[in-house]
């Protein structure tokens, strides 16, 4: 597959600065691995401060003209980029499976989801309205303009190598901003292929730049530059806090999509089939490696045993393996550290009284494959309830009353996504309002869409992505007072 992608021009290994494909200035490279077999897919340029500063300078220069285009002109470029991504969804999907590991069908699904942000924001570009405010003095007129913030530093993770980029770059470009993208060093290939398509779409050189390599060097250069007016980040809470603190130095705008600890609450009155289907989707998508994956499955005592039985019947049928193999729904975890984290959480849970109902160990395939796992008798004080496991482990907690369920669900510093399964309409409203989360799925496990706001409460982040609200993150509000009329 890698050879095929290479010969069709989809395997790019250099960074993109000012519309030119460029090696690291010192010639350094870093290896990109296929997590399913450990093979090296490519050696990509390993960049640092100097390349990042040049990428910022290119973005700054491009901003002057890109921001001056009409919204319709920018919209056309974005629409063309969308068309190209859709036309090449097979190749992009293959790249995602190669470097990230998720099953090909899921990877192609990610490409469609990624493209939807470009399409949506191509449309939104034309709807950045200002305001006219009734003046307080008769010889004045008061206007509100919305203008692009400027150069945007975009730092993204490996779990959605394409979607996390388009969700940021789509609205940024639509508003008239230009970007310096730093993809995860684990999954730069998809980002580079998408950037090449942006050039083909006619997005001008310098509007989209990509640098990858030394994460903290690149991050520090983006943070230090007064020309970068906004940092948008998806990744770990620890790095997000560092970036937010760093951004204070130049008072940049910051958007953060950080870790979650999603509760998935199942009431006695839930439709069992709906609850199982929804929980399966939110828990095992991407082998549990998403920030909206159910991290705590909180089940009411009347349905607990029945749910555990039925859920394990379904989970044990899931096929683990290389994402390119037909029928596989569970790919490898991203790396050895990810498996060790799962193992340590499981050990802690077992020591504190949790029981393994299914799985509970590495898969016989070796590498970073892990058995789909269900553990029961999980308690709030266990590590697995406190932090994101980010793997295919479903911990089942037990509750008696609605109040208790809400308390368990909110007992965390995170606040990204939450799920509730119930047939009681009044309860679904009560719970939706009581949950301290930015996203609530009621009787539904897959809720992300380009048209709705995605983002967290508490330490899960700042700002929203997708939807009309996603535009605000890349706009400054300017008040103009016209006096002495
Ligand atoms: P994850 O657990 O998803 O790997 P990270 O926060 O480590 O989360 O990674 C998300 C993104 O942040 C990646 O692109 C990574 O390279 C980048 N990153 C990691 N450390 C830093 C840093 N010190 N400064 C800027 N970016 C960083």
Image (spheres, rainbow, N blue to C red):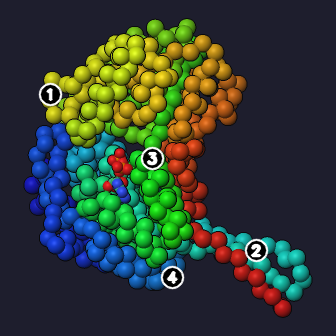
Could you say which disc has been placed on residue 68 in the image?
4
| Cα–Cα span, label 2 and label 3 | 39 Å
Classed neighbour count for the residue bearing mark 3: other residues with Cα under 10 Å, few (<14), some (14–19), many (≥20): some
Task: Point out the tag, 2 or 3, that comes first from the N-terminus.
Answer: 2
Task: Point out the tag, 3 or 4, that comes first from the N-terminus.
Answer: 4
Q: Tell me the element at label 1.
A: loop
What percent of the width, then of the height, locates residue 268? 57, 13
| Cα–Cα span, label 2 and label 1 | 64 Å
Could you say which disc has been placed on residue 237 in the image?
3
Q: Tell me the element at label 4.
A: loop
**Residue under label 2:** 132
Q: Nearer the viewer, mark 3 or mark 4?
A: 3
Task: Point out the tag, 4 or 2, that comes first from the N-terminus.
Answer: 4
The residue under the point 39% across, 23% down is: 394
| Cα–Cα span, label 3 and label 1 | 32 Å
Circles 4 and 2: CB atoms closer than 8 Å: no
The residue under the point 49% across, 11% down is: 304
């Amino acid at each position: 597959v890698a050879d095929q992608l290479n010969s069709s021009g989809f395997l790019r290994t250099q960074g993109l600065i000012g519309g030119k494909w460029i090696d690291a200035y010192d010639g350094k490279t870093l290896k990109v691995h296929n997590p399913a077999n450990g093979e090296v897919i490519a050696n990509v340029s390993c960049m640092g401060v100097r390349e990042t500063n040049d990428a910022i300078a290119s973005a700054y220069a491009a901003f002057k003209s890109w921001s001056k285009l009409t919204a319709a002109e920018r919209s056309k470029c974005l629409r063309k980029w969308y068309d190209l991504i859709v036309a090449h969804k097979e190749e992009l999907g293959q790249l995602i499976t190669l470097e990230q590991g998720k099953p090909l069908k899921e990877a192609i699904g990610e490409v469609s989801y990624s493209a939807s942000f470009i399409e949506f924001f191509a449309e939104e570009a034309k709807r950045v309205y200002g305001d006219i405010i009734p003046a307080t003095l008769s010889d004045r007129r008061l206007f509100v303009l919305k203008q692009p913030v400027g150069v945007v530093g975009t730092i993204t993770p490996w779990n959605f190598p394409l979607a996390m980029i388009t969700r940021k770059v789509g609205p940024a470009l639509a508003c008239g901003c230009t970007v310096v993208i730093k993809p995860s060093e684990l999954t730069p290939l998809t980002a580079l292929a998408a950037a090449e398509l942006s050039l083909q779409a006619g997005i001008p050189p310098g509007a989209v730049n990509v640098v990858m390599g030394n994460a903290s060097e690149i991050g520090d250069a983006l943070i230090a530059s007064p020309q970068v007016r906004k940092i948008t980040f998806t990744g770990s809470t620890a790095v997000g806090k560092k970036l937010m603190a760093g951004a204070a130095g130049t008072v940049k705008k910051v958007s953060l999509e950080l870790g979650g600890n999603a509760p998935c609450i199942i009431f006695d009155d839930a439709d069992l089939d709906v609850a199982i289907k929804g929980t399966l989707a939110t828990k095992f998508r991407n082998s549990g490696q998403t920030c909206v994956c159910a991290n705590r499955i909180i089940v009411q005592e009347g349905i607990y045993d029945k749910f555990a039985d039925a859920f394990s019947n379904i989970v044990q049928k899931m096929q683990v393996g290389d994402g390119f193999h037909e029928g596989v729904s569970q790919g490898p975890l991203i790396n050895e550290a990810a498996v060790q984290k799962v193992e340590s959480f499981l050990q802690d849970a077992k020591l504190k009284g949790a029981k393994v109902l299914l799985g509970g160990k590495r898969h016989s395939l070796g590498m970073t494959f892990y058995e789909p796992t269900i553990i029961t008798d999980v308690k709030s004080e266990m590590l697995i309830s406190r932090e994101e496991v980010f793997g295919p482990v479903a911990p089942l907690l037990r509750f008696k009353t609605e109040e208790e369920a809400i308390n368990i669900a909110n007992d965390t510093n995170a606040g990204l996504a939450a799920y509730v399964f119930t047939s009681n309409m009044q309860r679904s409203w009560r719970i939706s309002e009581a949950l301290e989360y930015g996203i609530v799925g009621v009787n539904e496990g897959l809720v992300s869409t380009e048209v709705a706001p995605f983002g967290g409460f508490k330490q899960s982040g700042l700002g929203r992505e997708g939807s009309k609200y996603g535009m605000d993150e890349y706009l400054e509000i300017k008040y103009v007072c016209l006096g002495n009329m």
